[in-house]
Amino acid sequence: MIHRPVGNWKVMFHANAFLADVQQNGLRGRDKLFSTNWLMLMVQRQFGRQGVMFRTMLSLEPLTITKRKPPTCPNW
């Protein structure tokens, strides 16, 4: 988590990431290594009584969860 002023702008950055390794046996089980993650960015600036703010929240999960399915749903 980072909160800083950059010139007249306030900048905020939050991030979180977990690495998971799932080991499943049996006919329907399979092993999978993936990451659950997100990051939030915000910039804000005041102009007198008015202000502007830009916010976004992103995730890299589409790159880390292959075949677009979590490991606990092998029949999707």
Image: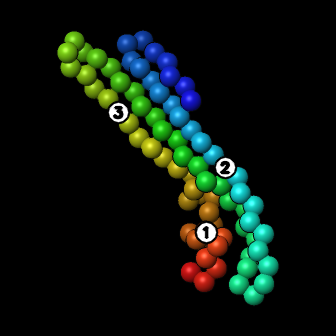
For label 2, the crowd category at 10 Å Cα-Cα, with few meaning under 14, some 14 to 19 and many 20 or more, is: few
- Give the residue drawn at x 60%, y 83%: 75
Whether residue 47 is situated above or below residue 30 in the rendered picture? above
For label 3, the crowd category at 10 Å Cα-Cα, with few meaning under 14, some 14 to 19 and many 20 or more, is: few
- Give the residue drawn at x 62%, y 63%: 65
Whether residue 41 is situated above or below residue 62 in the rendered picture? above
Mark 2 and 3 residues: CB-CB less than 8 Å, in contact? Answer: no
Quadrant (top left/top right/bottom left/bottom right) for the N terminus: top right
What is the quadrant of residue 23 in the picture? bottom right
Whether residue 12 is situated above or below residue 40 in the rendered picture? above
Identify the residue position indicated by label 3 in the image: 54
Q: Position of residue 29 (x, y in %)?
A: 73, 79
What is the quadrant of residue 64 in the picture? bottom right
Identify the residue position indicated by label 1 in the image: 70
- Give the residue drawn at x 46%, y 15%: 5
Mark 3 and 1 residues: CB-CB less than 8 Å, in contact? Answer: no
Q: How far separated are the C-alphas under marks 2 and 1?
A: 14 Å
Whether residue 59 is situated above or below residue 14 in the rendered picture? below
Quadrant (top left/top right/bottom left/bottom right) for the C terminus: bottom right
Identify the residue position indicated by label 2 in the image: 18
Q: Amino acid at mark 1?
A: Pro
Comes first in the chain, label 3 or label 1: 3
